[in-house]
Image: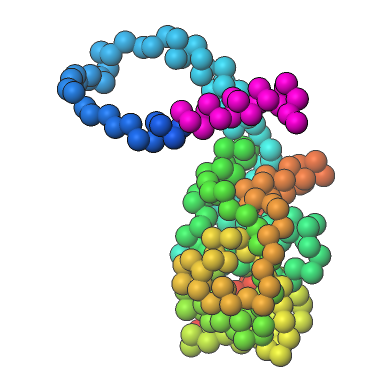
Amino acid sequence: MLSSKNYRYAAYSLVFSSLLMSSCHRHFLVSGNQYKQYSVTQEAGVDSSLVKYYLPYKKQMDAEMSRVIGKAERELTKPSEPETLMGDFFSDAILTEGLKKDPSIQLTLATKGGLRKTFPKGNITVSDAFELMPFENELVVLKLSGAGIQKVIDFIVKSNGQPVAGIRMKIKDKKAYDVFIGGKPFDINQTYNLLTYDYLANGAEDLDFLTDAIESKIINKKVRDAIIDHISDLTSAGKTINTQLDGRITVVN
């Protein structure tokens, strides 16, 4: 037998269900329309109530975005060359942060098109990191066969170099040789753990073969957060961003 409290809940539920069912059979017809055009021009007045509402949030956001998190010794550029300062910095940064989550990572792969800006010489702000990686991409670790890594190498060669870390190679006549991963010669019979981000892991930018990975694991770290954390850690250690080209991808004529 229902208690008085449960009886009331049952009654309310029955009434609500009846109203809901009846409303499903009600039809509404448009009886008329009225249109009016509002021009948004420089002469339009400012909605002070709206400004008053969002201004505190804007000030807070502006303060955070302009916060200095580090300093670069030189401008980090990204010209259309096999190896770039921005590419090296970016790849080294996500490798460093990724290893904190998964020590089994051996190499990283990004793409030139995914890096949206250069870093100026001098102070680096939170805003700079957001502009570099304005997307909500997550870091992903892919376990690839040696054949899968060979496809990564071929992709790097075909596209005239990409941002990488943990891997070194020479390229001649559009073929890679002297390929080293983690300081050891590349072995096509081995498996390797590649760090990248979900956009690429899902096959974007001609990387559809990455979807054939043996395993795929999200490590719960956004790419942008990895960049910010890496720069902040350098600053806390009294260091600056001092990236220099190291020949990780060398084209031999």
Q: Quadrant of residue 95?
A: bottom right
Residue 50 in the image: above or below residue 209: above
State the image coordinates of residue 55 (x, y, percent, origin top left): 52, 17
Image: 201 above or below 115: below
- Residue 11 falls in image quadrant: top right
The quadrant where residue 2 appears: top right
Q: State yes or no: residue 158 in magenta.
A: no
- Residue 226 percent location from the top left of the image: 68, 50
Q: Is residue 110 visible?
A: yes
126 in relation to 85, above or below: above
Q: How is the image coloured?
A: rainbow
Going 46% across and 14% down the picture, which residue do you hit? 51
Residue depicted at 80% across the width and 41% down the height: 236
Horizontal side of residue 235 vs 109, given as left or right: right
Q: Which residues are magenta?
A: 1-19
User: x%, y% of residue 20?
Assistant: 46, 32
Q: State the residue in front, 238 or 189.
A: 189
Toward the front, the furthest residue is 1
Q: Going 50% across and 73% down the picture, which residue do you hit? A: 208
Who's the residue at 72% across and 58% down the image?
A: 219
In percent of width and height, residue 45 lies at 31, 10
- In the drawing, does residue 31 fall left or right of residue 200? left
Q: Main secondary structure of the magenta part?
A: helix
Compared with 200, 193 (above or below) is below
Magenta-span inclusion, residue 16: yes
Task: Tell me, yes or no, if residue 240 can be seen here.
Answer: no
Q: How many marks?
A: 0
Check the picture and name the quadrant holding the N terminus.
Answer: top right
